[in-house]
Image (cartoon, helix red, strand yellow):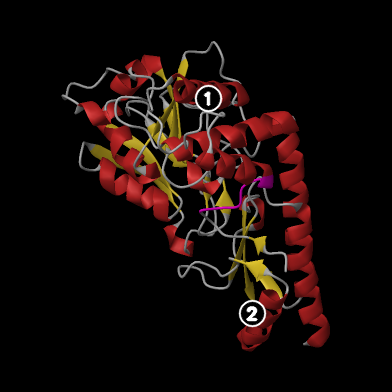
Amino acid sequence: MKKHNFSAGPCILPQEVFKKASEAIIDFNGSGLSLIEISHRSKDFVAVMEEAMDLAIELLGLQGKGYKALFLQGGASQQFLNVAYNLLENKAAYLNTGTWSSKAIKEAKLFGDIVEVASSKDKNFNYIPKGYSIPKDADYFHCTSNNTIFGTQIKDFPDTEIPMICDMSSDIFSRELDFSKFSLIYAGAQKNMGPAGTVLVVVKESILGKVSRTIPSMLDYRVHIEKESMFNTPPVFAVYTSMLTLQWLKNLGGIAAIEKKNDEKASLIYNEIDRNPLFKGFAATEDRSVMNATFNLTDESLKPKFDTMAKEAGLNGINGHRSVGGYRASMYNALPLESVEALVSVMQELEKQA
């Protein structure tokens, strides 16, 4: 039976990426050696790292604008710390839209004063705050573009006079934005780009070197830029697979092309949620995520039946996070439309049988 993978992360990846990555595990570039046993300093892997970094910059439209791409370790959680270590001298402004931004705020408080400009905690993070003010004397403004757990997504980013930092872990490369508005973007690979094990950081070099503290080498963005993501042994498989995924995206037509597909998938599921009386959406309509649709049953007694039907249809990973309950359909770049059609079909069949 075909499985439809709606997992929030690690997530679905393109089948051709799985195939190429698995082949490289056995024999990389016809070398007779596995990708995961060759030297990360070898010519073949250095080429992989360079292409992965170049593709990231190209797809984001940041060529020639003073940005560097890095593939590091520790996931987005490490970047909660790294951002503050490298950029926070006195105070920083944070928008709190969920679990991950709350964790970022916790880490940043170790380094300076944190101004929480707005929060949607009052309604269990089911909306994106608007109309807030960002202090002009803050060192930077930090936001989270997409909230995987709660199914909300920032549609309009503020114009700021200070550097804007964004955690884009769960919607990186999914929609067109003016990425030059951001001074630093970071994204764990396992949500929309590759397997767990690496995190992409895209940083404008001109914002670095402003803090007075001594930064440990492993946490210093300038060190990683100088060493071209090779300061320590990189996670070769995660970087290689991310490179393959970025190649796949470029060949599709880039972010503009995938955005159209993502919008089609999101429209299909949200139209059904709004039409079907057995379901209700969790996130505020205007803030709904294109990547993660969160919804609940209007009658919880139907849950065993719906769960059984979903399993029989091969739907995997649709259970909601414990913070929200209900269901969550994660529709990352590689998820085909037919998977969303399969989910909608089960929702409609439940309505017929209820």
Residue 108 x, y percent position in the rendering: 27, 41
Mark 2 near mark 1, Cβ–Cβ under 8 Å?
no
Which mark, by number, is residue 304? none
Vertical comparison of 271 with 211: above or below: below
Query: Which residue does the image show at 34% across and 42% down from the upper left?
Result: 74
Q: Which residue is mark 2?
A: 307
Q: Amino acid at mark 1?
A: Lys
Q: Which residue is mark 1?
A: 181
Distance of mark 2 from mark 1, alpha carbons?
43 Å
Query: Which residue does the image show at 40% across and 24% down from the upper left?
Result: 162
Query: Which residue does the image show at 71% across and 79% down from the upper left?
Result: 309
What main secondary structure does the magenta stretch of the protein show?
A: loop
Vertical comparison of 260 with 9: above or below: above
- The segment highlighted magenta reads 10-15
Q: Amino acid at mark 2?
A: Asp
Residue 47 visible (yes or no) = yes
Quadrant, the C terminus: bottom right
Residue 142 versus residue 197: which sits nearer the camera?
197
Residue 167 versus residue 76: which sits nearer the camera?
76
Residue 67 x, y percent position in the rendering: 47, 18
Say whether disc 2 or disc 1 marks the residue closer to the N-terminus. 1
Q: Quadrant of residue 256?
A: top right
Secondary element type, mark 1: helix
Residue 143 x, y percent position in the rendering: 45, 40
Residue 65 x, y percent position in the rendering: 52, 13
Q: Is residue 280 left or right of residue 354?
A: left
Q: Is residue 138 left or right of residue 250?
A: left
Q: Can you tell which of label 2 and label 1 is closer to the viewer?
A: 2
Residue 271 visible (yes or no) = no
